[in-house]
Image (cartoon, helix red, strand yellow):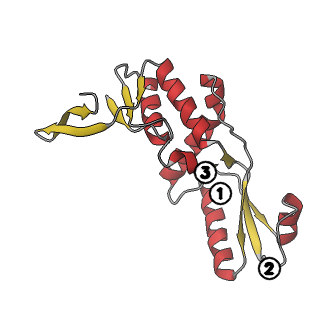
């Protein structure tokens, strides 16, 4: 399997392929790992999504990132920080309350917060214009660059080859199937 791109998605694909027993994995990155959009991502690891399946996927990611440093030896900067979403108008408050209801239905821990509780948890927050908030204590943050490096380390440990400085210049397709890739090195 050839994985094109060494950002967090490409490294995650390589990591998960070797986790599932695929042994012939080659990840190609045209420059350096994380040099595309990964390096400037916020690193927020929120769990609540629009559907149950997407929420389960986000929960899986949160659990993976929590344990990734122990699995690979590469620091990830993972911190379980929780997240606070605030409402300064009634429409946003209604949206947050619907989200909190979905979170409970998806078995996520969630708390409705009054403005004073926001100030207690986050003393530097301006709360004079808040109507309310929702707190998801299971949300986290991680360093996108370090997490990507940890995924790459895990992929390598499972047998994947990760090569930087090789640009994919063409994908060869025959009868609707990929049959090979052409790179800057052949």
* Residue 133, position as x, y percentages in the image: 74, 68
Relative to 97, say whether 47 is above or below: above
Q: Badge 3 local density, few (<14 within 10 Å), some, or many (20+)? A: many
**Disc 3 + disc 2, Cβ < 8 Å:** no
Q: Secondary structure at mark 3?
A: loop
- Residue 104: give its label: 1
**Judging from the image, what secondary structure is the residue with disc 1 in?**
helix
124 left or right of 15? right
Q: Which residue position holds label 3?
A: 47
| 175, above or below 106, in the image | above
Q: Is residue 71 left or right of residue 156?
A: right
Is residue 97 found left or right of 59 in the rendered image? right
Indicate the quadrant containing the C terminus: top left, top right, bottom left or bottom right. Answer: top left
Does 75 appear above or below 90?
A: above
Which tag is nearer the camera, tag 1 or tag 2? Answer: 2
For marks 3 and 2, the one nearer the N-term is 3
Q: Residue furthest bottom?
A: 90
Quadrant where the image shows the N terminus: top left
Sequence order check: which comes first, mark 1 or mark 3?
3
Q: Nearer the viewer, mark 1 or mark 3?
A: 3
Query: Toward which corner of the image does residue 165 lie, by quadrant?
Result: top left
Disc 1/disc 2 C-alpha distance (Å): 27 Å
Instruction: Identify the residue at image location x=60%, y=57%.
Output: 105
* Element on which disc 2 rests: loop
| Distance from Cα at disc 1 to Cα at disc 3 | 12 Å
Query: Which comes sooner in the sequence, label 1 or label 2?
Result: 1
Q: Position of residue 164 (x, y in %)?
A: 42, 30
Residue 40: x percent and y percent?
Answer: 57, 50
Q: Nearer the viewer, mark 3 or mark 2?
A: 2
| Residue at horizontal 37 percent and vertical 22 percent from the top | 22
Residue at label 2?
A: 129
The x, y position of residue 68, in whole percent, is 61, 30
């Amino acid at each position: 399997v050839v994985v094109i791109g060494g950002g967090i998605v490409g490294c995650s694909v390589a990591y998960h392929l070797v986790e599932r027993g695929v042994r012939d994995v080659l990840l190609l990155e045209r420059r350096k790992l994380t040099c595309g959009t990964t390096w400037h991502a916020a690193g927020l690891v929120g769990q609540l999504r629009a559907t149950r399946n997407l929420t389960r996927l986000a929960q899986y990611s949160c659990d993976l990132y929590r344990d990734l440093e122990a699995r690979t030896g590469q620091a990830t900067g993972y911190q379980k920080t929780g997240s606070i979403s605030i409402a300064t108008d009634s429409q946003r408050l209604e949206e947050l309350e619907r989200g909190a209801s979905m979170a409970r239905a998806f078995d996520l821990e969630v708390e409705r917060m009054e403005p004073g509780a926001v100030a207690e948890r986050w003393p530097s927050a301006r709360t004079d214009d808040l109507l309310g908030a929702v707190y998801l204590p299971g949300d986290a943050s991680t360093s996108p660059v370090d997490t990507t490096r940890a995924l790459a380390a895990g992929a390598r440990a499972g047998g994947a080859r990760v090569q930087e400085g090789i640009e994919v210049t063409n994908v060869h397709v025959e009868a609707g199937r990929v049959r090979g890739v052409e790179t800057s090195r052949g």
